[in-house]
Amino acid sequence: MSDEKGKPEESVPLQSQAHDRPETFHHSSVITHPSNRLFVISGASGAGKDTLLLELLKRHPELERCVTFTTRAPRVGEADGVDYHFTDEPTFRRMIEEEALLEWAEVYGRLYGNSKEWVLGRLAAGASVVMRIDIQGALTIKRKMSEAVLIYVAPPSLEELERRLRSRASESPEELAVRLNAARWEMEQIPHFDYVVVNDDLEDALGLIGCILRAESARIPSGKD
């Protein structure tokens, strides 16, 4: 594995590995309205992405959320088809073989992926789609769909990130140590994103994302991909 910076595909942490086929989807070919966009929200675990996304969807009903498939078990309060599509590994592996996923990654021993048919279909229908995925998945999406808008949600500091992870008490001490170690690598990937939003105050972060949405709705697609 190379230590050279600027090449995320060669810097994958041991606990997270993305997988994608060498194909490129022509995002401009599925844009039917100038404001039609694919927004990808990602960032370090514990940065507050889920809370931001839930509030964002309330305030921007024009966005359609892509629900991720995963093989991990539901956490307390999570609902199938709402928070994730929970599935077993054989079913997920079959989706991979059938090339039904736009991207997929193995993160901390669990599989995550998003439906290619659903995303491309909604974009073709004129919708703006938002997805919340891990860093590996976000970088894969950018390689395949260059006009996808990548938004990195960052914590105010690594110390605050550790506090948030400990307070949610959803990982074992071993899993927590792995996530904190991976967070340093995840923060190094910020230059590969289009925007960074520091989630120190929820209202401020939501306001900044709202500005990003408005700016992107006015941007003319390049038509180069």
Image: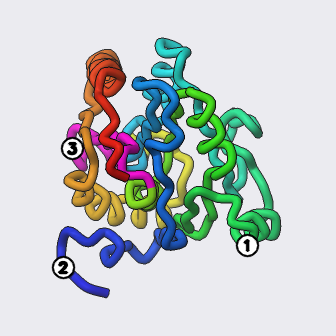
Q: Sort mark 1 into few (<14), some (14-19) or many (20+) by Cα contacts within 10 Å.
A: few
The kind of residue on which mark 3 rests is Ser
Examine the image and state in which quarter residue 105 appears. Answer: bottom right
Whether residue 45 appears in magenta in the rendering, the answer is no
Q: Which mark is residue 4?
A: 2
The kind of residue on which mark 2 rests is Glu
Residue wearing tag 1: 97
Residue wearing tag 3: 157
Rendered residue at 53%/23% (across/down): 63
Examine the image and state in which quarter residue 65 appears. Answer: top right
Q: Nearer the viewer, residue 32 or 9?
A: 32
Spatial CA distance of label 1 from label 3 is: 40 Å
Residue lying furthest top in this view?
Answer: 59
Mark 2 or 3, closer to the camera: 2
Q: State the image coordinates of residue 138 (x, y, percent, origin top left).
A: 42, 53
Question: Are circles 2 and 3 on residues that touch, CB within 8 Å?
Answer: no
